[in-house]
Image (spheres, rainbow, N blue to C red):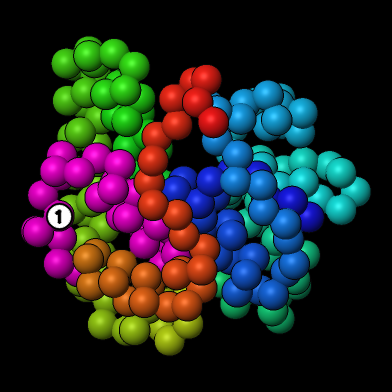
Amino acid sequence: MLLIGQYDSPFVRRVGIAMTLYGIAFDHAPWSGFGDVDKIARHNPLRRVPALVLDDNSVLTDSFVILEAIDDMVGPDRAFLGRAGADRIAMLRLCAFAAGVADKGVSLVYERAFREGLPMWVERCQSQVRDTLALLDAERAARTSEWLFGDQLSHADIVLATMLRFISEALPGMFAMSGLAALRRHSEACEALPVFQSICQPYQLTMPGEQ
């Protein structure tokens, strides 16, 4: 299998971390959604990352879809990052909020990089990120277990950490991280794990035409 996308993307990174934890072998193509768009288009007409090329050459895109497929591949006995029952609904809820923050962060990066930004749109995105970070911080603070759902990592744990690192590096100073003590502790615990350190790339925006 081939995972396409740079690890400074929280979405690509969460997939790479999950596959590594599951022991799934894959090659990695660290292609930029701008600088390498022609390469990506050969596999994914949406030209978005992450994209996962399966062994039969079919392609999956969107980190939620990819992780659902991966959990199905390894089976319920090995898919320890997933959850069942009420915990699954809670996990998916937190994943969606964290991924939504990351998505709005990407919008703010593009506004800053490609135009001065429509003030109303920028403020809306900033409010969405700021308020959802506060919600996620409160949710994490309310849980006293090592991880969100006990003593094992979940998909929610991973995306909270990859999202927070992305927001911190891609939009430095835009949000008051000092007030997010629970999220910061969670991120630090995740980033200390070997798999997070190996599936990692400092953030750098690659502009169109750059390699």
Q: Is residue 110 visible?
A: yes
> 191 or 80, which lies in front?
191
How many residues crowd mark 1 within 10 Å: few (<14), some (14–19), many (20+)?
Answer: some
Towards the viewer: 153 or 1: 1
Which quadrant is home to the N terminus? bottom right
What residue is drawn where x is 31% and y is 23%? Answer: 113
Is residue 87 something one can see in this rendering?
A: no
Question: In this picture, which residue range is highlighted in magenta?
Answer: 155-182
Residue 157, magenta (yes or no): yes
Q: Secondary structure at mark 1?
A: helix
- The residue under the point 36% across, 62% down is 161
Q: Position of residue 112 (x, y in %)?
A: 27, 24
Examine the rendered structure and indicate whether residue 78 appears above or below residue 65.
below
Q: Which residue is mark 1?
A: 177
125 within the magenta span: no
Quadrant housing the C terminus: top right
For the point 55% across and 35% down, which residue is it?
Answer: 32
Name above or below for residue 145 compared with residue 6: below
Q: Mostly what secondary structure, the magenta segment?
A: helix
Query: Against 104, is 175 above or below?
Result: below
Where in the figure is residue 126, as x and y percent of width and height?
20, 33
Residue 142 in which image quadrant? bottom left
